[in-house]
Image (cartoon, helix red, strand yellow):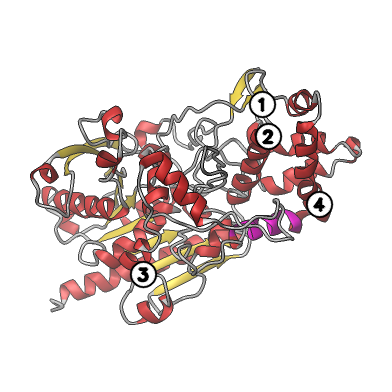
């Protein structure tokens, strides 16, 4: 048995409360947990069969002509040409627009591209996002790249999209594949980038599959209560008692923490390691488990964020509803938390102080302080979490403290749009698939209705966070198989139209 790190720092989305003089509870947009994450267990003999890692010399700043803008860095990308039909056949190139972390992690969890590559005879390329993984500017030295706002200022979605366009164009030229069509794919933040890439660079990509992409989670387009309302409904739909136990537990935890000997009671109840404990840390630890279990409520066993069984929300509620535990609320919560943190049963205790970041996700904090101002974390009276409101001032105060910068909450909608999206894109955009699973809390900020015949929303009532992009298994439910078949059919149509236009010298 071993000590289990339970870090839950920020990017793909929840509640990391930070307190300091002058502000408190500055909640940063959630991200995937880090130290508790292990690579997905793949259905191939080795990871090396999936891809080969290569590097591209990328420009530091695409939007200025000052001398320092011409500095370069090595950007990693992964490539798989096993099934590619070749440039002479104009075989397609499928590109994954990398997220806020190590690109290998995302490649290993995007089985849909590998599963469909033989059918399309596609070349597969996964491009790592600048400032993450091994794609670090300033000589690859994170101590320099992450040191202050002057260097981190080159980390943005627009720079990342320009990176992808530059790399794709150069790769096609080197492969003599100028006329091979490109389709971009992405999930979560990567899905947002895929959709925006198609809108910004239609001459580079003929279409985009944007899975679980909350591009409407900005400004006042989506209610800040939506995210946690969906999590609440996920648990409540499994068991009313489960919902009530979790909802009523926060006050009990706080009251226990304030009593003499209360923290020791909490330590023993939740098997917390002896180095650190507080009532707030316990609450964040539990909240993280609920949030990410709801996000990844997959219909088959998974190991994306942490090893978990199929339908993990159901399993959490099963633990909470266990009659053998009587009225012991903490024992019920401990059983639920184990579904997320210790499904393998190998943890002897949980380390709430661990701040390691093996997947290199930490720089999402910068993005969440500059352009990714996504109002979430508000809770109404029905919420499974304590009542709270979204407070932009707290975010701004934290960002001033951490980086001495002011967020730009309106920049994303200025750069990419979002308001009145159906009216705007109906006669402008084309060839985008927006997939959303309604059990995913991010679906509230997604595109849930088709905008036109070629900007299509695919919505799965029982779907979770980018479940469509996962490797197919024999246990996949019929609805998930149907989603993927529909996506393949739509992409096939895009390619057919492209080849038809090319053959007829479309002006």
**Residue 417 marker:** 3
Q: Residue at x 22, y 70 (%)?
A: 499
CB within 8 Å, label 3 to label 4: no
Q: Real-space Cα distance between discs 3 and 4? A: 39 Å
Q: Is residue 315 magenta?
A: no
Callout 3 environment at 10 Å: few (<14), some (14 to 19), or many (20+)?
some
In the shown orientation, is residue 284 left or right of residue 95?
A: right
CB within 8 Å, label 3 to label 2: no
Callout 1 environment at 10 Å: few (<14), some (14 to 19), or many (20+)?
some
| Sequence order check, earlier mark of 4 and 2 | 4
| Label 4 element class | helix
In the shown orientation, is residue 147 left or right of residue 177?
A: right
| Viewer-side label of 3, 2 | 2
Where in the figure is residue 352, as x and y percent of width and height? 61, 28
Task: Between residue 127 and residue 136, name the one nearer to us.
Answer: 136
The part of the chain drawn in magenta is 227-236
| Sequence order check, earlier mark of 3 and 4 | 4
Task: Between residue 122 and residue 158, name the one nearer to us.
Answer: 158
| Label 3 element class | loop
Where in the figure is residue 232, as x and y percent of width and height? 69, 56
CB within 8 Å, label 1 to label 2: yes
The residue pinned by badge 1 equals: 277
Where is the N terminus found, in terms of image quarters?
top right
The residue pinned by badge 2 equals: 282
Q: Residue furthest front?
A: 22
The residue pinned by badge 4 equals: 244
């Amino acid at each position: 048995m071993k000590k289990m790190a339970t870090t839950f720092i920020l990017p793909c989305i929840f509640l990391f409360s930070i307190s300091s003089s002058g502000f408190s509870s500055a909640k940063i947009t959630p991200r995937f947990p880090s130290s508790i994450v292990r690579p997905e267990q793949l259905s191939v003999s080795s990871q090396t069969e999936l891809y080969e890692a290569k590097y591209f010399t990328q420009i530091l700043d695409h939007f200025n002509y000052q001398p320092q803008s011409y500095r370069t860095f090595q950007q990693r990308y992964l490539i798989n040409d096993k099934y590619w039909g070749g440039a002479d056949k104009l075989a397609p190139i499928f590109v994954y627009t990398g997220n806020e972390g190590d690109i290998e992690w995302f490649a290993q969890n995007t089985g849909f591209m590998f599963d469909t590559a033989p059918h399309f005879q596609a070349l597969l390329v996964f491009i790592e996002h600048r400032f993450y993984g091994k794609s670090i500017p300033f000589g690859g030295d994170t101590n320099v790249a992450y040191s202050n706002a002057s260097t981190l200022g080159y980390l943005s979605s627009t720079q990342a999209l320009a990176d992808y366009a530059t790399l794709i164009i150069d790769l096609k030229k080197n492969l003599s594949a100028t006329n091979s069509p490109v389709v971009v794919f992405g999930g979560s933040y990567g899905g947002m980038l895929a959709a925006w890439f198609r809108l910004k660079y239609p001459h580079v990509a003929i279409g985009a599959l944007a899975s679980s992409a909350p591009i409407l989670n900005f400004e006042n387009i989506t209610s800040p209560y939506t995210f946690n309302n969906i999590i609440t409904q996920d648990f409540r739909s499994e068991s009313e008692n489960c919902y009530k136990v979790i909802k009523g537990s926060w006050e009990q935890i706080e009251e226990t923490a304030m009593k003499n000997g209360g923290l020791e009671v909490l330590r023993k109840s939740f098997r917390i390691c002896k180095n650190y404990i507080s009532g707030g840390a316990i609450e964040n630890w539990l909240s993280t488990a609920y949030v990410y279990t709801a996000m990844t409520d997959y219909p088959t066993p998974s190991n994306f964020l942490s090893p978990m069984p199929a339908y993990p929300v159901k399993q959490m509620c099963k633990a909470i509803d266990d009659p053998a535990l009587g009225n012991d609320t903490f024992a019920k919560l401990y059983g639920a938390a184990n579904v997320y943190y210790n499904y393998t049963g190998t943890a002897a205790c949980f380390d709430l102080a661990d701040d390691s970041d093996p997947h290199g996700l930490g720089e999402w904090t910068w993005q969440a302080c500059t352009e990714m101002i996504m109002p979430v974390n508000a809770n109404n009276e029905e919420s499974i979490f304590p009542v709270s409101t979204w407070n932009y001032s707290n975010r701004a105060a934290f960002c001033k403290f951490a980086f001495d910068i002011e967020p730009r909450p309106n920049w994303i909608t200025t750069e990419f749009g979002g308001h009145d999206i159906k009216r705007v894109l109906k006669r402008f955009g084309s060839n985008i698939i927006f997939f959303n699973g309604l059990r995913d809390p991010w679906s509230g900020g997604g595109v849930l209705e088709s905008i036109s015949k070629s900007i299509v929303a695919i919505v799965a009532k029982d779907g979770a966070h980018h479940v469509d992009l996962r490797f197919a298994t024999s246990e996949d439910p019929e609805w998930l198989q149907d989603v993927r078949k529909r996506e393949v059919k739509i992409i096939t149509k895009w390619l057919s139209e492209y080849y038809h236009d090319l053959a007829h010298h479309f002006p």
